[in-house]
Amino acid sequence: MLISLGTHMGCDVSVRADVLTEMRAAASSSFPNETGGLLMGFDRAGGIEVALVIGAGPAAPECPDSFTPDRDWQYTEIDRLFEQTQGTIRYLGDWHTHPLRGTDLSALDRSLLREISTTPAAQCNEPLMAVLAGGGERPWIDAFFRYSRRAYVPWQSVQRVHYRVLPDAKSGADAGIGAD
């Protein structure tokens, strides 16, 4: 299924269909509260692929207008995935929901992207952020954004990116982490 093809800041963004399904399921199960987590993936020729997500974590408190992730649990999951994939999977950015609101980034979201890009441990100079908006009677709509420190003017440092949806990891020729 192809949602949108495009590149931004020299990078093609691809997202596996099962990743979107997992984020939407988490959003629905947490509704009317916010939830979120981490985007994990790898570099591909000419771009990046979002191959997995890590959730908010078991100790993450949720409320309708914000959430605080269980960072200790998330860091353990990152280490486990890194080990399991022999370093193929890396951190790409964050995702979260905006229940009953739109996909526009808040000032806090933009600040978080800037912080991620300058945090050496994140090893992510141009992080992604996915936002899922909707819930209740409204379907979940997703949008992906990317931060770039190379923008000419500060208000252009965060741009919405187009992406393409890839088949599930378990289907067809695209099976397996890092398959081309």
Image: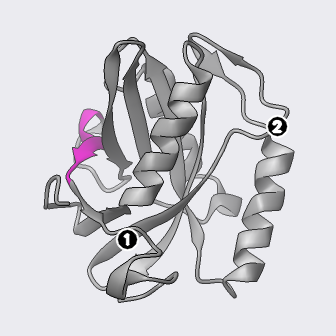
**Quarter of the image where one finds residue 163:** bottom left
Is 137 placed above or below 118 here? above
The amino acid type found where label 1 is placed reads Ile
**Quarter of the image where one finds residue 29:** top right
Dividing the image into 4 quarters, which one contains the C terminus? Answer: bottom left
Q: In x, y percent, where is residue 8?
A: 20, 59
Q: Which residue is mark 1?
A: 48
Q: Which residue is mark 2?
A: 58
Q: Nearer the viewer, residue 120 or 79?
A: 79
Cβ atoms at labels 1 and 2 below 8 Å apart: no
Residue at image point 59% right, 75% down: 89
Residue at image point 64% right, 53% down: 119
Judge whether residue 120 is colored magenta: no
Q: In x, y percent, where is residue 54?
A: 64, 52
Q: Disc 1 or 2, which lies upstream in sequence?
A: 1
Q: Nearer the viewer, residue 30 or 158?
A: 30
Judging from the image, the colouring scheme is one colour
The amino acid type found where label 2 is placed reads Pro
Q: In x, y percent, where is residue 27?
A: 52, 30
Residue at image point 73% right, 63% down: 78
- Report the residue that reaches farthest toward the front: 171
> Count the marks: how many?
2
Q: Is residue 7 left or right of residue 158?
A: left
Is 109 placed above or below 25 here? above
Q: Nearer the viewer, residue 104 or 123?
A: 104
Secondary element at image label 2: loop
Q: Nearer the viewer, residue 180 or 171?
A: 171
Secondary element at image label 1: strand
Instruction: Identify the mark at residue 90; answer none if there is no mark.
Output: none
Q: In x, y percent, where is residue 172?
A: 35, 83
Q: Is residue 7 left or right of residue 59?
A: left
Which stretch appears magenta? Answer: 155-162
